Amino acid sequence: MDEYSAREEKVAALLKEKGLKVTTAESCTGGLIAGTLVNVSGISSHFEEGYITYSNEAKERLLGVSHETLEKFGAVSRETAKEMALGARLKAGADISIVSTGVAGPEGGTKEKPVGLVYLGCAFGDEVAVERHVFPGNRWEVRYASTQAALQLLEKVMTEDKR
């Protein structure tokens, strides 16, 4: 088992140990986080549904991200990641959510929001942790690095929880 498959196995073990249900909401990773979680046999006991919300309209309709947030801060922002995380957790009836929104490239980057900029959000109860990353590489490398960082964030949040 390499370090990456070990990460998804560890996340699955923590979900099982804590008796938690997880959901995903993904923009720039396009389902890669969910796809990585389902590499683990038995994950269906802890992962029932996820969302791919690539467009702003989907973020609003499926996750309840406010139109005002998207207009003011944009889809690739700390604020949007936070609303995505809370919305996904509530919509799925999950205990914890992990979300991604970013610019995978090679087009779409700006000086303020360069290619590789990704916000990851993790909602556990009403608390939300958001991380900002700028990953180097091509589109696949940004998506892959985002997925691995998302699993790390999910693991970190569950490990730090004292419930």
Image (cartoon, rainbow, N blue to C red):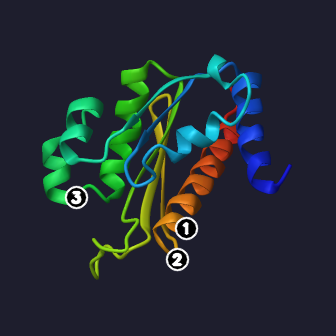
Instruction: Please tell me the numbered disc located at residue 141.
Output: 1
Quadrant where the C terminus sits is top right
Disc 1 secondary structure class = helix
Crowdedness near tag 1: few (<14), some (14–19) or many (≥20) residues, C-alpha within 10 Å: some
Residue at image position (66%, 37%) is 158
Left or right: residue 47 compared with residue 128: right
| Spatial separation of the CA atoms under disc 1 and disc 2 | 7 Å
Identify the mark nearer the N-term, 3 or 1.
3
| Spatial separation of the CA atoms under disc 3 and disc 1 | 23 Å
Callout 1–callout 2 Cβ contact below 8 Å:
yes
The x and y percentages for residue 15 are 69, 28
| Residue 3 to residue 107: above or below | above
Residue type, label 2 = Pro
Identify the mark nearer the N-term, 3 or 2.
3
Q: Nearer the viewer, mark 3 or mark 1?
A: 1
Q: Which residue is mark 2?
A: 136
| Residue 76 to residue 113: above or below | above
Q: Which residue is mark 3?
A: 74
Left or right: residue 36 compared with residue 127: right
